[in-house]
Amino acid sequence: RKHLFCMTNMSYTRHEGTDVFLPHSHIISEWISRRLSLLDEGIYTCYVGTAIQAITNKVVLKVGVFLTPMMKYEKRNTNSFLICNVLSVYPRPIITWKMDNTPISENNMQETGSLGPFSINSTLNITGSNSSYECTIENSLLKQTWTGRWTMKDGLHKMQSEHVSLSCELVNDYFSPNQDFKVTWSRMESGISSILAYYLSSSQNTTFYESRFSWNKELKNQSDFSMNLTDLSLSDSGEYLCNISSDEYTLLTIHTVHVEPSQETASDNKGLWILVASLILVLCLILLIWKVKYCTAQIEARRSRHPADGAQRERRRVSTESTHDDNASDNAEENMVRHYFLYQTIYSIKMLL
């Protein structure tokens, strides 16, 4: 609610939707009381008159908006982006980006709300994975500053069935004993984030969504939220994101994990391939023998369907040269058919292998 009071000339700044509060000793007369909005900005005049004197004072009211911003990490194909987003802010904030503490320019900014409050997305393309990035959003009217920070750790290579430990700490620059924060561990895959665990400092409650995931309770009490993931499988390869957020900051830490097949698994796979190849070879040999027998049976069947008559047998006995020619012709035909089926069988083996 808003309370305006007659007092000495001064300006006063409050959040939209909050109460205006002044020490009781400065109150002369309450004039109006209701919820604040941006339309309430302006100069208010208060008049107090008595039989002795009259007092007229002016109050300048300014209204600011600063809904807690957030930093998001996104992957689009092979490119990685950071997005600093504030859904509601007034007046226009000051947004700055730094890479390794060196100021840089944003790649894109989108703004909605022509008169305010404004909704702003500031996007930066990550060009150096070994660098740290920082985004700062400042509301000069309310004198509030929010900071988002992104860091990528060195890639980790693990064998299948091993475990991995991924670090994530709340550094002293941002830690405040009386400030509530939340910690979220998630896995990034194909642009989709799946939550592994969630922690709220206000309630000290932890929720797990992956049975193989665990936190060290002693380290957690020291603001160290490093995670352990046990019994790794090949499908666990990918990026893991730790997000520590409060009203004043967002800290993102990225880990890349590569899980490789263990020696036992590789040996088992090799033996399986040898077995499969041996079975294919045996099947091909059986097919080759069957085709040769089939070819021979076809030739014998054709000969039995066309027996030579007596005159032909007599001529073969009389003419030795003619007999050799006929046998050569039959043998050539038989060899040709066998070679054809042999060629077909070899071709089939190549296709199978």
Image (cartoon, helix red, strand yellow):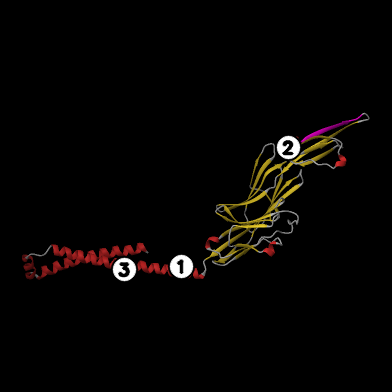
Residue 52 percent coordinates (x, y) = 94, 30
Is residue 42 magenta-colored? yes
What secondary structure is found at the residue carrying circle 3?
helix
Q: Which residues are magenta?
A: 41-50
Sequence-wise first label, 3 or 2: 2
Give the quadrant of residue 201.
bottom right
- The CA span between labels 1 and 2 is 68 Å
Is residue 104 magenta-colored? no
For the point 35% across and 62% down, the residue is 351
Residue 137 percent coordinates (x, y) = 71, 48
> 273 or 340: which is nearer to us?
273
Sequence-wise first label, 1 or 2: 2
The residue positioned farthest toward the top in the image shown: 51
The residue carrying mark 2 is 38
User: Is the residue 235 above or below the residue 74 in the image?
Assistant: below
Sequence-wise first label, 3 or 1: 1
